[in-house]
Each structure stands twice: as structure tokens, then as C-alpha cells.
Image (cartoon, rainbow, N blue to C red):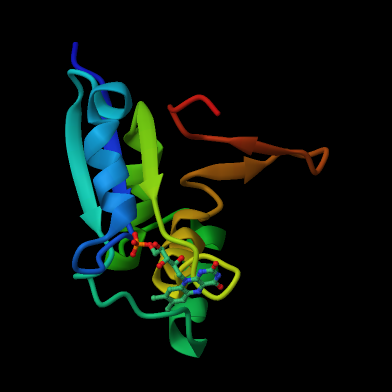
Amino acid sequence: MRQKILYVNACFREGSRTADLVQLMKERLFGEGEVTEVSLGDLELKPMDRQMLKVYNESVASHVFEDPMFLYARQFREADRVVIAAPFWNYDLPAVLHTYLELVCTQGITFDINEKGVYGSLCRAES
Ligand SMILES: Cc1cc2nc3c(=O)[nH]c(=O)nc-3n(C[C@H](O)[C@H](O)[C@H](O)COP(=O)(O)O)c2cc1C
């Protein structure tokens, strides 16, 4: 079966050199896999605000993840391989990638904490 590859694309500047590197390395990064691209320059992701955080915390507590904000965490969990391409902006990640990763890190979808307080991954991809 073909590997499911999640390509998180944060290099959306016109003429991006990071995007060029991805193209140069595409055989190695994607191989024969089935690629799903998350194009962060086009999604209009909203940073977690008061209302979103309320929904997030209630969903984590009830283990019912119906809000569309959980799509990204689900996609991330199901991937056999995750490729993240991002430029260096202001000594950090582009803010939209940070926002995306905040949504990906959802307890009960991509990770959980056992009774001893130890964190564990629920994702398919190996680190
Ligand atoms: C908003 C913004 C912030 C940046 N901040 C930094 C920085 O803090 N340090 C640095 O060395 N380069 C910085 N750069 C330069 C980029 O890292 C560099 O242009 C890189 O090639 C961008 O990747 P790209 O070609 O894939 O767009 C910044 C560029 C942009 C547009």
C-alpha cells in the first residue's frame, strides 16, 4: 500500500527558495507516496482565541472532536510521514505554522497522557 504523506507547506513566498529545495528533494521526501498538501498560505487559519480554546478544552475533556478545527490533528495522526517545509522568519517559524501546530497538538488525537503523567504519541508516523 502507498504511504500517506502529509506535506505541510509554509513556503508560500512567490519564488520561495525553500519551495525550490522541496522540488529538488521531492523523490527523497515523497517517493511513491500519496501526498496530501496543507497549503498554509491559503488556509486563513485563526490563532486560538478565547472561544476556540473553550471548544478545544471541552472536546479534549469529552473526547468528542466535532469542530472543524480538529481536521488538522486528524490528518496529522493518519499520516505515515509528515514533511514540513518552512522558511526562517524573525528568528522563528512563520506564525501560521505555529498556529497550525497548535491545532495539531490536540490531546486525544495526536497525543495522550497516561495515568502516570507520561506523554505518548497517537500518530502513525515515526519520529
Ligand atoms: C517575514 C520575513 C522574516 C524573515 N526573518 C528572517 C530572520 O529572522 N533571519 C534570517 O536570517 N532571515 C530572515 N528572513 C529571510 C528569509 O529567511 C529568507 O529570505 C529565506 O530565503 C526565505 O525563504 P523562502 O525563500 O522560502 O521564502 C525573513 C524573511 C521574511 C519574508
3, 120: nearer the viewer: 3
Task: Give the x, y percent position of residue 12.
Answer: 25, 65
38, 48: nearer the viewer: 38
Judged left or right of residue 102, residue 29 is: left
Residue at position x 23%, y 23% from top? 27
Q: How many marks?
A: 0
Residue at position x 56%, y 61% from top? 61
Judge whether 6 appears above or below 44 on screen.
Answer: above
77, 11: nearer the viewer: 11
Quadrant of the image for the C terminus?
A: top right
Task: Give the x, y percent position of residue 87.
Answer: 42, 60
Residue projecting furthest to the top? 1
Residue projecting furthest to the right? 116
Quadrant of the image for the N terminus?
A: top left
Task: Give the x, y percent position of residue 69.
Answer: 33, 66
Judge whether 46 appears above or below 20 on screen.
Answer: below
Please state the quadrant of the image where ligand 1 appears: bottom left
Residue at position x 32%, y 28% from top? 29
Q: Quadrant of residue 124?
A: top left
Judge whether 66 appears above or below 35 on screen.
Answer: below
Task: Give the x, y percent position of residue 110.
Answer: 49, 44
